[in-house]
Amino acid sequence: MAIGGGKGRRTDRLVVLGGNAGMREPGQVWLVGAGPGDPELLTLKALKALQAAQVVVHDGLVSDEILDLAPVGARRISVAKRKSRHSYSQDEINRMLVAFALEGLNVVRLKGGDPFIFGRGGEELEACREAGVECHIVPGITAALAASASAGAPLTHRGSAQAVTFVTGHAAQKGRGGGGEPDLDWDSLARANQTVVIYMGLSMAAPIAARLLGAGRAGSTPALIVENASRADERRVVTTLAGLAEAAATLTGPALLIVGEAMALAQALPFPRSGRGEPSAEEPMVERASLKLSGTTGLPMTQQAGLALSTPRSAAGGPPLPLRGKGKDQ
């Protein structure tokens, strides 16, 4: 069976084996969150599902390192959007998952981030249920969590962020023309002391910033843009709501916009991953105004913070016990 058709579109894009549906037990569909890109952020459950896959239907943002974790004999099908050719519609993807499962195959729908955070996983789940196909959900680390962690800026923070809201930067698409400005509760999002995370909002940064400013959010509110969160080519730009549009214009890749007082904590320099005192050659690029540290007195940081940390001693009151982690011999 071929799925496709229509003027100017391929009709051989999806070939589903036929004739054996009544001879096999139905397979299963696994909606698996691949995380933000770093293979080390893939969950163990996601890894197990991927290793048992016979068919992997994946997004374009899923890295080759993660795809290579699937069995060599598993069929890979990319449903990525490309400017040079038509992408699979969501309806085609839904039918693809169901058709392969009805052939008795174990199907993994591998999605960047989490399947249920702007991943259209709910629509695929509904399609499986309507067809009587068993569907499992494996959550993944969504990009907002990875971006927040890499920048050292918490999404919620006592005194400056009592709430966090995830929104989409685009309205629902109509046909193939693409969506425009999202219809959001701007007055609610403009309230202070909360973090607003905008997915897929890079190209809409200017109207989004204008809406938030127009609804009363201060232009001085800290903002953070993270491109390719958790990947080797991650790039971060720390700015303000007033400068959000200008900063977004310097980026082109998949990026998150994060607005909120807690973004003032975003690190100007990344923590080194190489284990040495300086960042490695693969560290993310960060742009920010100079960071000023105040209150350094030469005392240990624990004393500056008013903390009294005691060293554990032996039961007999002897010398301090060494602080050790649990090793293989403990």
Image: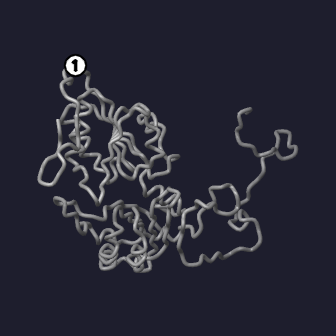
Q: Which residue is drawn at 25% across and 53% down?
A: 87
Percent position of residue 249, x then y: 39, 75
Farthest right residue in view: 318
Q: Is residue 148 above or below residue 78?
A: below
Q: Can you say which quadrant of the picture contains the N terminus?
A: top left
Residue labelled with disc 1: 23
Along the viewing direction, whichever of 329 and 235 lies nearer the viewer: 235
Farthest top residue in view: 23
Q: Which amino acid lies under the numbered mark 1 shown in the image of this protein?
A: Met
Along the viewing direction, whichever of 155 and 280 lies nearer the viewer: 280
User: Where, by quadrant of the figure, is residue 205 drawn?
Assistant: bottom left
- In what element is the residue under mark 1? helix
Q: Which residue is drawn at 68% across and 66% down?
A: 305
Q: Going by the image, does 85 lie left or right of 306?
A: left
Q: In this view, does 250 lie above or below 228?
A: below
Percent position of residue 121, x then y: 29, 46
Percent position of residue 107, x then y: 32, 35
Q: In this view, does 146 lie above or below 185?
A: above
